[in-house]
Image (cartoon, helix red, strand yellow):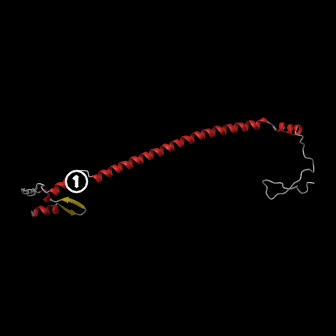
C-alpha cells in the first residue's frame, strides 16, 4: 500500500526543464484485493398510519383551491387575449380608414392643382389689361397721383383715414 501512494509522486522527476519518466513507472504495481461489500438495505415499513395515507392521497390529487386558481388563470389569459385581438382589430380598421382618407386627399390635391392651372392659364396679362381699360374704365395713374407713404409695419397698411399729402 505504501508503494501505491508514493507511485504518483515518484512517477516523474525534473531534470532541468524537461520532464522524463522515472523507471519505477514501468514496474508493475501490486494488485489490489477485491473486497466484498455488502450493501445495506433499508427496511421499509408498510404505510399503515391513516394520516400518512391521507397525506399521500392529497399530494396526488388536485385540491379545490388549486383547481380554482387554474380556472381563474385560464380565464384571465383568455380575456386578455380577447382584449388584445379587439384592440388589434380597431387599429387595423383605423389604419384602413387613414389609407382611404389619404387617397381621397391625394385626389383632391390633384383636382385643386388642375383647377389652379386652368385658372392661371385662362387669362393672360394682355386679356386682363384689355378688360380693365375697356370694360371697367381703368386708366394708368398720372404723374403726381402716386403718393408714397412710410409705414412702421411693412407687411400691410390699414387705412382708417385719408392719407396725408394726397390732396
Give residue 158's position: percent from left, percent from top: 81, 54
Q: Classify the position of the N terminus by image quarter.
A: bottom left
The residue singled out by tag 1 in the image is: 59
128, above or below 4, in the image: above
Is the residue marked by circle 1 packed among few (<14), some (14-19), or many (20+) residues within 10 Å? few
Could you say whether the residue bearing mark 1 is in a helix, strand or loop?
helix
Residue at x-position 51% and y-position 42%: 92
Relative to 154, residue 114 above or below: above
Front in this rendered view, residue 6 or 124: 124
Q: Position of residue 131 (x, y in %)?
A: 86, 37
Residue ID at (50%, 44%)? 90
Q: Position of residue 20 (x, y in %)?
A: 20, 59
Between 23 and 9, the residue placed more toward the observer is 9
Residue at figure coordinates x 32%, y 50% from the top left: 70
State which quadrant residue 10 falls in: bottom left
Q: Is residue 10 above or below residue 105?
A: below
Amino acid at each position: 500500500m505504501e508503494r501505491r501512494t508514493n507511485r504518483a509522486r515518484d512517477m516523474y522527476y525534473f531534470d532541468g526543464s524537461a520532464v522524463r519518466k522515472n523507471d519505477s513507472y514501468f514496474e508493475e504495481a501490486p494488485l489490489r484485493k477485491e473486497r466484498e461489500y455488502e450493501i445495506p438495505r433499508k427496511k421499509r415499513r408498510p404505510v399503515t398510519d391513516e394520516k400518512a395515507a391521507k397525506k399521500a392521497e392529497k399530494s396526488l390529487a388536485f385540491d379545490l383551491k388549486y383547481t380554482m386558481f387554474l380556472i381563474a388563470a385560464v380565464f384571465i389569459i383568455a380575456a386578455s387575449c380577447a382584449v388584445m385581438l379587439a384592440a388589434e382589430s380597431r387599429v387595423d380598421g383605423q389604419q384602413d380608414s387613414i389609407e382611404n382618407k389619404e387617397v381621397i386627399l391625394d385626389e383632391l390635391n390633384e383636382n385643386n392643382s388642375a383647377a389652379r392651372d386652368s385658372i392661371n392659364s385662362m387669362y393672360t396679362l394682355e386679356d386682363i389689361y384689355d378688360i380693365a381699360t375697356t370694360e371697367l374704365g381703368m386708366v394708368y395713374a398720372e404723374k403726381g397721383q402716386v403718393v408714397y407713404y412710410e409705414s412702421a409695419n411693412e407687411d400691410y397698411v390699414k387705412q382708417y383715414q385719408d392719407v396725408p399729402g394726397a390732396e
